[in-house]
Amino acid sequence: MVHLYHKTKVYVLKQNTLRIDNLLEMCKSGDRRAQMEIYDRYHRAMYNTAYRIVRNREMAEDVMQEGFIKAFEKLHTLKDPEMFGAWLKRIVINGSLTACRTSGSQLTVVTDKELPEASESDAAFEDAEGMPDQLKKMMHAMKNLHANYNLILTLHYLEGYSQEEVAVLMDMTHGNCRTMLSRAKESLRKCLQ
C-alpha cells in the first residue's frame, strides 16, 4: 500500500486503484510518486512497443525512457486523460522511428533477396506466459523478417495503425506502404510454413 499526498488530499494506492485522471493531475503538479505509478503501469508495454520497432534492447530502453520524459513534460497538452495510454504509445512509436532513422537504420522497401539472416541476439523481451502457441510462433517468425517488414507488420497489425497512418509514420507513399505490407505478409507466410 502506498500513500500519495497531493495538496490537501491523501490518496491510498492498492494495486492500481487510483484513476488515471487523478494520477495525471498529480503529475502536472510535479508529484514524483504519481509519475512513478504511471511509469509502473505502462513501462513494460511501452518497452515492448519500442523494442518491436528498434529491435535493440538498449535503444528500446532509451526510447521508452525518453517517451515518458516527453509525456510528463507535455502532459498539459493532453486533452482527454482516458487517452493517455494511446497518447504515450504514439510518443514512443514516433521516438522509435526517429531512433531508427538517426541510428542509420533505413526504412525502405526491400526485396526478399536482401533479407539478412536472423540472429538469436535479436530475441525480444516478450512476456510469453499465457500467449497462445500460434501467436508465439508468429512473433518468433516476425523477428526473423527484415527490419522494415517487421516494422510495417508491427505498426499495422500489432499497434493498430491504418495503412495511411503507417505510410505517414514511415514517410512513404500509400502505394509503397501497401506494396511493402503485401510483401511483408508474404514473407511472414513463408517463414511460418
Image (cartoon, helix red, strand yellow):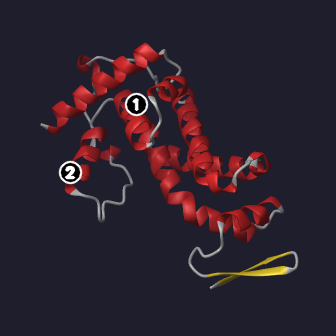
Disc 1 residue type (three-letter): Ile
Label 1 – label 2 distance at C-alpha: 20 Å
Name which residue lies at 30% across and 27% down.
184
**Residue 12, how many percent across, how many down?**
69, 83
**Residue 60, how many percent across, how many down?**
50, 46
Name which residue lies at 71% across and 71% down.
33
The one of 57 and 80 positioned closer to us in this rendering = 80
Mark 1, secondary structure of its residue: helix
**Residue 157, how many percent across, how many down?**
38, 39
Residue 55 seen in render: no
Would you say the residues marked 1 and 2 are in contact, meaning their CB atoms lie under 8 Å apart?
no
| Crowd band around label 1 with a 10 angstrom C-alpha radius: few (<14), some (14–19), many (20+) | many
Name which residue lies at 47% across and 47% down.
49
**Residue 34, how many percent across, how many down?**
71, 68
The residue positioned farthest toward the bottom in the image shown: 1
Name which residue lies at 24% across and 33% down.
188
Q: Is 88 situated above or below 18?
A: above
The residue positioned farthest toward the left in the image shown: 193
For label 1, the residue is 152
Q: Which mark is residue 124?
A: none
Q: Is 130 situated above or below 97?
A: below
Q: Quadrant of the C terminus?
A: top left
The one of 117 and 64 positioned closer to us in this rendering = 64
For label 2, the residue is 134
Disc 2 residue type (three-letter): Gln
The one of 188 and 66 positioned closer to us in this rendering = 188
Q: Quadrant of residue 187?
A: top left
